[in-house]
Image (cartoon, grey):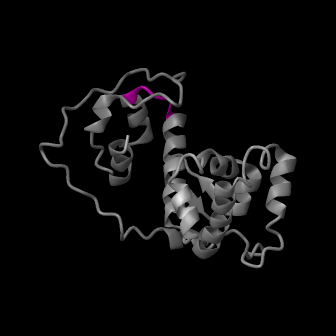
């Protein structure tokens, strides 16, 4: 199911669906990082970690360049750094975010963004000399851990017709309708999002 179909089905703006998928993809990558145990636990605790601080970075020009990522029209991350280097950089941001060093006061306007990221210029763990390249995207295309589950008849819900004019003014924090808890798109990653709602 496409983002447009999901937006129409749940009467949400396409951008809200895309932003949510991107946040989900980043959060999944944060969970896969090799971090200190206390940082890993803090990532799962909403009182210690806010994804909006990481979101602020990956949505900014400086942050995209630092992480070597772009977001495609489907909310998927497109990487242009070696996987190991990307994970090191994302790990630095995650650690700073859970410790309160990365927030709107340290990563606000353009000047603050450049100032915050410049602290990594001399970090011996990072190799900022690596030039971004689309060839590194191949390192991220390992879907061996993704298992598509078949939809069983009891999980199948009656087809809901698509709305003709989805709202483009619906708030991005609008709750997912109750029907979504039983709806299956056929895409395991999207289904996990709705299952956790």
Looking at the picture, how far across and down is residue 153, in whole percent?
12, 44
Examine the residues drawn in magenta and state their main secondary structure.
Answer: loop
**Which residue appears at 73% of the width and 72% of the height?**
131
- In the displayed structure image, the side of residue 9 where residue 126 appears, left or right: right
Residue 38 locus on image (x, y percent) = 56, 64
Residue at (56%, 50%) from the top-left corner?
A: 72
Q: Position of residue 170 (x, y in %)?
A: 51, 23
Horizontally, residue 62 falls left or right of residue 165, namely right
Q: Which residue lies furthest to the bottom in this view?
A: 124
Q: Does the magenta stretch include residue 107?
A: no
**Is 59 positioned to the left or the right of 185 in the image?**
right
In the rendered image, residue 13 lying in the magenta stretch gets the answer yes
- Decide: is 179 above or below 153: above
Whole-percent x and y of residue 109? 82, 43
| Quadrant where the image shows the C terminus | top left
Query: Measured along the vertical axis of the image, is residue 93 above or below residue 158?
Result: below
Q: Which quadrant of the figure has residue 144?
A: bottom left
| Image quarter hosting the N terminus | top left
Q: Where are the magenta residues, as a range?
A: 10-14
For the point 64% across and 71% down, the residue is 88
């Amino acid at each position: 199911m496409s983002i447009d179909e999901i937006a129409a089905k749940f009467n949400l703006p396409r951008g809200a669906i895309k932003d949510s998928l991107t946040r989900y993809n980043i959060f999944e990558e944060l969970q896969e990082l090799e971090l200190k145990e206390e940082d890993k636990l803090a990532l799962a605790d909403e009182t210690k970690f806010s994804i909006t601080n990481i979101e602020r970075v990956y949505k900014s020009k400086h942050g995209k360049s630092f992480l070597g990522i772009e977001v495609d029209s489907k909310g998927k991350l497109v990487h242009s750094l070696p996987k190991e280097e990307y994970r090191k950089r994302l790990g630095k941001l995650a650690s700073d975010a859970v410790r309160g060093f990365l927030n709107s006061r340290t990563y606000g306007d353009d000047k603050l963004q450049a100032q915050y990221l410049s602290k990594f210029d001399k970090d011996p763990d990072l190799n900022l000399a690596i030039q971004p390249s689309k060839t590194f995207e191949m390192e991220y295309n390992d879907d061996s851990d993704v298992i598509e589950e078949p939809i069983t008849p009891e999980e199948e819900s009656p087809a809901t017709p698509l709305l003709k004019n989805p709202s483009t003014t619906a708030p991005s924090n609008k709750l997912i309708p109750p029907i979504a808890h039983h709806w299956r798109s056929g895409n395991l990653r999207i289904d996990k999002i709705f299952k956790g709602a």
